[in-house]
Structure formats: structure tokens, C-alpha cells
Amino acid sequence: MLADLLERNRDWSASRQAQEPDYFTRLAALQAPEYFWIGCSDSRVPANVVAGLDPGEVFVHRNVANIVHSSDMNLLSALEFAVDALKVREIIVCGHYGCGGVKAATEDLPHGLVDHWLEPIRRLARAYAVDLRRETDIEGRRDRLDADPATGLGPRGKGACPRIDLRAEGRAPARSRLHHRTGPFQRGGG
Ligand SMILES: [Zn+2]
């Protein structure tokens, strides 16, 4: 199994180099992505693939149900690096249809540790309960919490801050702009 992955990696590397001889030299020299992508860990929604971007074009953080916890040092460290060091121009919090995390958050069943992780989604569902009740079935409610119908990707809930465009504000100081524009950032989106 792992040998197969290594073989695939060798094939991909050779093929990429054949297409663009200086590809790896260029990538190794500089990482300058314009986007910081906060997405779901779901294997079906890799940021590069669904956004049509090459390696080096998007800096990525993923977790179950693309949640932004204000105490998540992993995400906050990545965010700090993206804004301060990489100077990304846009931060995208992106969800998707059929999210297992959203499904788990809307079920009245125990799922283990992830129940703690998913609490912000439950809070969001409670905050928009009146709106969500307009959907007649549970799948419709999950879709409202999940994604944009047009693309299968997108924001979770109204005003959930799916994308932050730093260009409109100028690049610096990005962090203070970020808090100014998004309010309670721990609310999460995607
Ligand atoms: Zn998901």
C-alpha cells in the first residue's frame, strides 16, 4: 500500500518535471500563495483540486467541518503565518455539501471526542433555528449549514464570513483588519 503511494509519487514527480523542467526548483525557492484556505478534512474536497490551483498557490488548513475555534493553536498559528509571513491576500473558510461533520452535529447521537469539536455548528444551528426550520427535511437543513448550492462549496449560514478579502483593506496590518471585519472569528464559517 505505502509502496504504491511512493511509486505514484515518483511517477507524478517525473511527469511534472517533464512538463515543466524548472517546476520543483521554482517551488522550492519561493512560497507565495495569495490564498489561505480553511477547509474540511473530507478527502473529497482538497483545496488545490476543487479551486483549480497548483501547489504553491494556496496555503491550507483543514479540520473536521472546517471550524474556526478561537482556542485552536494549530489554526491560529497557520493563520498568523499566512497573514504575517506569507502575506496572503484572501482568507477563505469553505464548507461543502454532504459534510459528515455537519451531519454528526445535527444528529442526536454520541460520536465521541468530535462532539466537543462540533459544538460551534450546534450553536450556529440554534442561532439560525427559525431560518433552518423553513427547510422541510433534515438534508435541506444540513445543506443550509453546509454549502452554496451552485458549487457544492461555500459559506455556512448567513453572515458566517466565508471569505475575507484583504485587498480592499490594504495588506497591513492584516490581523487587526481581520478582527475588525469578521467580528467574533471563532464563530466559524465554511
Ligand atoms: Zn466536511
Image (cartoon, rainbow, N blue to C red):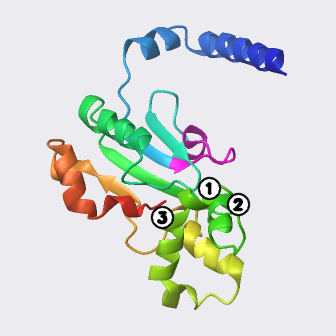
Q: Residues within 10 Å of mark 2 (few under 14, many from 20)?
A: few
Q: Residues within 10 Å of mark 3 (few under 14, many from 20)?
A: many
In the displayed structure, 43 sits above or below 165; it is: above
Residue appearing at x 69%, y 47% in the figure: 44
Q: Name the residue carrying label 3.
A: 155
Tell me the element at label 1. helix
Side (left or right) of 60 relative to 73:
right
In the displayed structure, 141 sits above or below 78; it is: below
Residue appearing at x 55%, y 85% in the figure: 132
Q: Residue 76, image x and y in percent?
A: 36, 42
Q: Name the residue carrying label 1.
A: 114
Q: Residue 175, image x and y in percent?
A: 21, 46
Along the line of sight, the residue nearer the viewer: 109 or 78? 109
Q: Is residue 147 highlighted in magenta?
A: no
Along the line of sight, the residue nearer the viewer: 169 or 189? 189
Please, what is the three-letter code of the amino acid marked with disc 1? Val
Q: Residue 53, image x and y in percent?
A: 52, 37
Viewer-side label of 1, 3: 1
Tags 1 and 2 touching, CB below 8 Å: yes
Tags 3 and 2 touching, CB below 8 Å: no
Residue 147, quarter of the rendered image: bottom right
Residue appearing at x 24%, y 34% in the figure: 84
Q: Name the residue carrying label 2.
A: 111
Please, what is the three-letter code of the amino acid marked with disc 3? Pro
Q: Which comes before the other along the chain, label 3 or label 2? A: 2
Q: Residue 108, image x and y in percent?
A: 69, 75
- Which range of residues does the magenta coloring cover? 39-51
Residue appearing at x 55%, y 14% in the figure: 20
Tell me the element at label 3. loop
Viewer-side label of 3, 2: 2
Please, what is the three-letter code of the amino acid marked with disc 2? His
Q: Residues within 10 Å of mark 1 (few under 14, many from 20)?
A: few
